[in-house]
Amino acid sequence: TGKARADCLSWIMWQMGSAPFLGGGFGHFYTYAPEPLEYPINRYTMETKRQLDVLDTHLKDHEYLCGNNESDYNIADMIVWSWYGQLALGKLYDAAEFLQVEDYKHLQRWAKKIAERPAVKRAVALELKPID
């Protein structure tokens, strides 16, 4: 339906607009910056936690980002999970405890459910190789 497509596209656009704050902001200053700087770490931590709350609140009433049926699992879940699901599962930036990701119960449920999908398991297990 048109609504289902719009919901999917909305979550894809949400990820494209939000993930730079997670990766380029929080991830950079928390993990990769040459020296820890309190202000940007605090700023991007609060934004990352706000985004986790957006997801957690939405997932309270949804099994997947765009619905409650297995058929509602779509590219939006895949794209958002690659950043936020893995963060919630403690796979990014060694920051799970710092961000208190366990507090986001609905996000945790969703992240674990997606992580158990056979195709996701295969993708995560792939060896990363440089492009020649």
Image: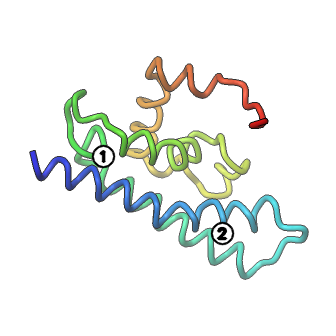
Quadrant in which the C terminus is drawn = top right
Quadrant in which the N terminus is drawn = top left
Q: Which residue is mark 1?
A: 65
Q: Residue 25: which numbered mark, if any?
A: 2
Where residue 7 appears, as percent x and y from the top left, is 22, 53
Q: Secondary structure at mark 1?
A: loop
**Residue kind at label 1, given as amino acid type:** Leu
| Pick the front one: 3 or 101 | 3
- In the image, is residue 131 above or below residue 51? above
| Pick the front one: 67 or 5 | 5
Position of residue 92 in the picture relative to residue 122 (left or right):
right
Where residue 90 appears, as percent x and y from the top left, is 63, 42
Q: Secondary structure at mark 2?
A: helix
Where residue 52 appears, as percent x and y from the top left, is 47, 58
**Residue kind at label 2, given as amino acid type:** Gly
Marks 2 and 1 in Cβ contact (< 8 Å): no
- Which color mode does the image show? rainbow
Q: Residue furthest front?
A: 132
Residue plotted at (44% across, 22% down):
117
Residue plotted at (83% across, 67% down):
33
- In the image, is residue 30 above or below residue 40? above
Cα distance, mark 2 to mark 1? 24 Å
Q: Residues within 10 Å of mark 1 (few under 14, many from 20)?
A: many
